């Protein structure tokens, strides 16, 4: 536990960040740059953080990069449809083999999240609201150093019904001005992969500058991490004649 | 399935119902009487409903009554400490052996619910609020004929953190005027028993007269039901010499 | 509950059933025909059962058929890759909208199951074994009238690691001669759809003639059923201006 | 994460260890002594390990000891009934407030485990068997460095039905010579407490000397740990007038 170095790749769509003046003001270093800084700030020498984005070759997610990524974070919105299926396949395979995945905000609608969930991942939404976040699993590692309740002053509303499988662990619930509710912090285990969906974060609000949000994402990175030597793919059906077990445990 | 007769016992503490003028006005037939009527109304000839209360011998829960009860509903508040431990033990044993249990509102703090959960079951509360209820598991039998969202105009606030085990199935979430959130419809399986906790319902508000609330409780009764012939106790550790299985399946 | 008519479509690949002499001997009425008979036998006038197969137009799953199907059962093996993606999409959408789905044996590797799970659904296997099935959730509706343990004398071995999400409810566990273990009865909720995976059943063994297996499948059909009027799709993200709730509940 | 020191108290009943010649031969340093050594060996300078036993004042679990314990492990068998209720209450309160708990083998029948589960925790058993353990959640921290399958050559059989709530996370399944199956590695979250039940380990077999078993227990200790500063009790219902949230977050 003590000598772990977590290699994090922060993926950002980088569309609003380049195109929209308003977004550039809120996130002069881009959203993914800001998210990367927050992780670095909270986890220090325990992490090595880099960014990747849609406009790079293979969206910045080459085999080399993926093979040296322990945890991938994902923010997308305007360009979900521009992400190549081949890249989604590669990321999907890595997640099932043990790469952690943190899906942020509008990433609920990304190809990779929808594929992992098997449901539509649709939800309700409205601009211009305020989010109040409650911890409903106070012993969970992702809730560490997070108060029982905190507020994000400016935030988009995301509301139920959120069409996801029941989370393996529900960590946070959120409410909004209109009385809406949302399962805003959800853990899923898929294969060997550990997936955390966290809904706060919108391109026109300074959500990723807020200390509690940065803490939650950093906690999520630690929770989602699996040691690389432990990872093995399980993508085929293995015929196993009597005696396979003895051979297997001899190794 | 079609010939099922569900025998329901609606248990009420019957303290506020007798003592408080305000409560008598809202529930002239008592709260348990009103809850019983609602179940009868929704399930018709599929149920046989009776009531029992704290002031009766053995709190109205004699062996004879319990042995002919398929689903027990529980409302208590002022007199949790007056419920005898011996009765709690008997109910606990029955639930684990397959009797369904519907725990309502302040029943979260009852001896039987706390014993089944293993946690404190503590929560936040405030009088004089409004509850908005969202279905977050729309394919669940308890959500049948319930709209995606509905409101209870006058209701006490119950808020997180609610100290329960993560529900086996989360069906409803509620929000309140102060922005609070609550896991208001929770299913738990314990032994062979099916337990549904539903938080709406307060002695001074006409909650149990509201059609959606009656529908949810009736749905809960159907969900919690197990056929009596299926029930068997599992309270001892059974030594099982090689060959037990063959004997067991010969029966 | 009492007047429910469940419309079941039993889907079979119908390849081994036509091609292999050995299979024709064990299942002279085809596997899907035998499964359909078992459901009819156990649920009587509560069900209306028909079959559909790969070789029919649209694999027998036209809009008309799907729109009048409450629960679909799925057995496939040699021809998973022959199932058209467009049909898989239609079935997927129906399941998320509330059509029940029972996936049998080698159906774990079908396009529809893999898509709903989001994982590889890979497993270990070996011919020529014996399966012993244990109920680990004795209060579950699918365990009704099923003994605590029963044996299938001739059966293929399916063993862990089975790459599925943790089931929402685990009902059965199986063991085999080689000491293997398998999560053989698994419930999943996806959207409004209720999905039951049950691993027993192989084309060259008379598994679907065994009374306990027929009972489990019939129980699964009842468990997976949702009333059609309750079904609504949730495939889009709905913008919801303040006030949407009042309008919605006015309906 | 890197500077964590986990303070572990290994509790042993210390009855067989003193009384039975056969047990003294297998565990010359007592069972709890051996378990403590295994934890120390695997976690090194990240842990501080001590032991406590039934025969000590307050069973070795004084307030001072409990207040400086991050994770408690529990092995009992012959003397469950000798554990004082007052000590059980104190341990229960600490677990709900965030102290981790590892329950081993026959500890399934201890007062503290039964109280936390709310069920009978009964099971089947037989002496003189062999246990084969399968990982069914390969991405789980408790499965780290554990092979997909391993065998304990001499072990008691523990079999289903095991009367526990469905685990929040199921990590291991076991099979035995007689074809039995058991949920042998189960995680439960209760309040802020993280509880891991692991069934291998019997007084007359050298199970706690086996490297995989020691590794699992060490992994369990790391998984069950919560930082002490995070722990807070939640044993009362808190009246929360409008505005409580603002005050709470001002802190």
Image: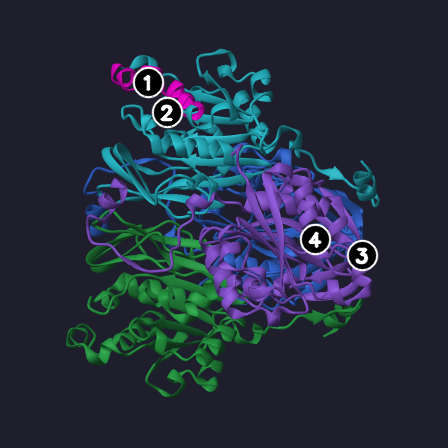
Chain colours: A blue, B purple, C cyan, D green
In the picture of the structure, the residue carrying the numbered disc 1 is C16
Does dot 4 land on a helix, a strand or a loop? helix
Q: Residue at x 44, y 16 (%)?
A: C54
Residue marked by disc 3: B26
Determine which residue is flagged by label 2: C77
Find residue B33 and name its label. Answer: 4
Label 3 crowd (10 A; few <14 / some 14-19 / many >=20) = some
Q: Quadrant of residue C64?
A: top right
Quarter of the rendering occupied by the C terminus of chain B: top left
| Residue drawn at x 37%, y 72% as measured from the top left | D74
Estimate how packed mark 4 is, as few (under 14), some (14 to 19) or many (20 or more) residues with alpha carbons within 10 Å: some
The subunit letter for the residue under badge 1 reads C
Chain letter of the residue beneath label 4 in the structure image: B
Q: Read off the magenta span.
A: C21-40
**Label 3 to label 4: alpha-carbon separation:** 12 Å
Nearest to N terminus: mark 2 or mark 1: 1
In the image, are marks 1 and 4 on the same chain?
no
Q: Nearer the viewer, residue C217 or D234?
A: C217
Which marked residue is nearer to the observer: mark 3 or mark 1?
Answer: 3
Q: Are marks 2 and 1 in contact (CB under 8 Å)?
A: yes
Density class for disc 1 (Cα within 10 Å; few <14, some 14-19, many ≥20) is: many
Mark 2 or mark 3, whichever is nearer to me: 3
| Residue for point 47% across, 73% down | D4
Image coordinates for residue C110, horizontal then vertical, percent: 43, 28
Q: Would residue B231 be found to the left or right of residue B41 on screen?
A: left
Subunit under mark 2: C
Quote the CA–CA distance across marks 2 and 4: 56 Å
In the rendered image, residue A71 lying in the magenta stretch gets the answer no
Residue A160 coordinates in the image, percent (x, y): 69, 45
Give the residue at the far bottom of this rendering: D57
């Amino acid at each position: 536990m003590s000598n772990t170095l977590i290699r994090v790749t922060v993926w950002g769509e980088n569309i609003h960040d380049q195109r929209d003046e308003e977004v550039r003001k809120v996130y002069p270093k881009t959203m993914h740059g800001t998210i990367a800084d927050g992780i670095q700030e909270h986890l220090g020498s325990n992490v090595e953080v880099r960014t990747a984005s849609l406009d790079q070759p293979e969206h910045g997610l080459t085999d080399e990069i993926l093979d040296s990524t322990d945890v991938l974070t994902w923010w997308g919105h305007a360009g979900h449809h521009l992400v190549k299926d081949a890249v989604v396949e590669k990321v999907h395979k890595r997640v099932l083999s043990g790469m952690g995945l943190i899906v942020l905000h509008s990433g609920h609608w990304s190809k990779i999240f929808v594929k992992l969930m098997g449901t539509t991942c649709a939800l309700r939404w409205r601009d211009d609201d305020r989010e109040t976040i409650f911890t409903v699993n106070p012993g969970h590692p992702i809730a560490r150093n997070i108060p029982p309740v905190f507020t994000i002053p400016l935030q988009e509303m995301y509301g139920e019904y959120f069409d996801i499988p029941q989370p393996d662990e529900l960590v946070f619930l959120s409410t909004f001005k209109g009385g809406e509710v949302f399962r805003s912090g959800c853990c899923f285990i898929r294969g060997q992969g550990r997936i955390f969906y966290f809904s706060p974060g919108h391109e026109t609000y300074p959500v990723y500058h807020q200390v509690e949000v940065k803490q939650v994402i950093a906690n999520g990175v630690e929770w989602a991490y699996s040691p690389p030597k432990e990872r093995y793919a399980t993508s085929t059906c293995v015929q196993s004649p009597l005696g396979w077990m003895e051979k297997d445990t001899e190794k």
